[in-house]
Amino acid sequence: MAETDESYAAEIESEIAKLERDAERSQKSGNIEKALRLLERALAFKLEAYGPENPETASAWTSLTNNYNVYAMKHLQDEDFKASHSLLSKAKALLESPANVISDEEKRRLLAITYNNFACYYKKKNMLKSALTHAEAALEIEMASLTADTPSATHLNLCAILSQMGRHKHALEHARSALELLLADRENQVVAAPKELAGDEDEKTSLLAVCYHNMAVEQEYLRMYHPAIESYRQSYEIASRDLGPDHPTTLALQDSGEEAVSCYICLKMYKTPLCEALLAAFCACVGIFICVRDLFT
């Protein structure tokens, strides 16, 4: 009897290993639907073979949820809305299942990611009320979580949604909240990132540059032109310093700032020493060698 049990366990383990290898091959070849089906089967086998308490089962549960989210966003980028919504719904259903085997904290972390991705989905579909509801749900979870991944990104998502809704004062508040979180994260790095994760710092820095840019846009809407110029300058400086002057993000932020500054100059909105100083600082930062005072005359 013991030999039979051992033989069955070995057979299950072999099948799980095969499913995971086949899933990896399918992912590499771009057959995402097949890869996810294989991972779903692998999770079912692990539940049967190892039980819900086993770390292997919890790891597979987390991995499948992450994959649903990752590929949902890829489908969204390709504007395959049906496939994107289907995968996000699967991720949500997996997390809310009574059979859920992951810890409550991990469940909250993954739910926040899933709700945030739903917000991106609805924002792209221009269903702004639904986008706002999901982004606010994500932020509420993250604010109560010890291991939340992206509260700063969620604030920026809310900033973008509220801006599209014309609620620019509230949008700016979320941009400022994101800025506060990002600066605290950069200045108080309690855990040093391993060398193999060095790219994570670039990602955060890029998010910081985008945050300053979004602040500038909202400040413009609110006719806060002096702070807007300074925010554009900060945005470009951070991206240029940390990503490089030729990075696509840096170039896009430079173009955005230059367009705004050109508008201020052409319209001659202000003729004050402060405005001239801010415009001159921005122009020097991006390498526009002009005499701002001459343009105001």
Image: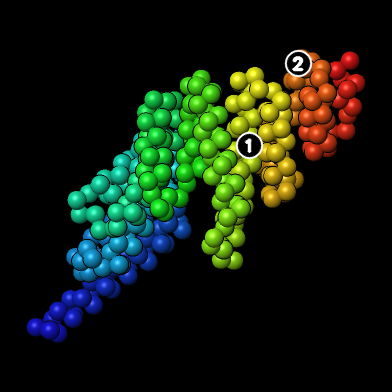
Q: Amino acid at mark 1?
A: Tyr
- Where residue 42 sits, quadrant-wise, is bottom left
Residue position marked by numbered label 1 in the rendering = 212
- The way the protein has been coloured in the rendering is rainbow
Determine whether the residue tagged by mark 2 lies in a helix, strand or loop: loop
Image coords of residue 40 (percent x, y) = 28, 56
Residue at the limit of the structure toward the left, as seen here = 1
Q: Nearer the viewer, residue 77 or 98?
A: 98
The residue that appears at 62% across and 48% down in the rendered structure is 205
Image coords of residue 187 (percent x, y) = 61, 53
The quadrant of the image that shows the C terminus is top right
- Can you tell which mark lies on residue 227? none
Q: Amino acid at mark 2?
A: Met
Q: Is residue 185 left or right of residue 275?
A: left
Residue position marked by numbered label 2 in the rendering = 269
Image: 277 above or below 40: above
Q: Are marks 1 and 2 in contact (CB under 8 Å)?
A: no
Image: 252 above or below 169: below
Q: Nearer the viewer, residue 61 or 240?
A: 240
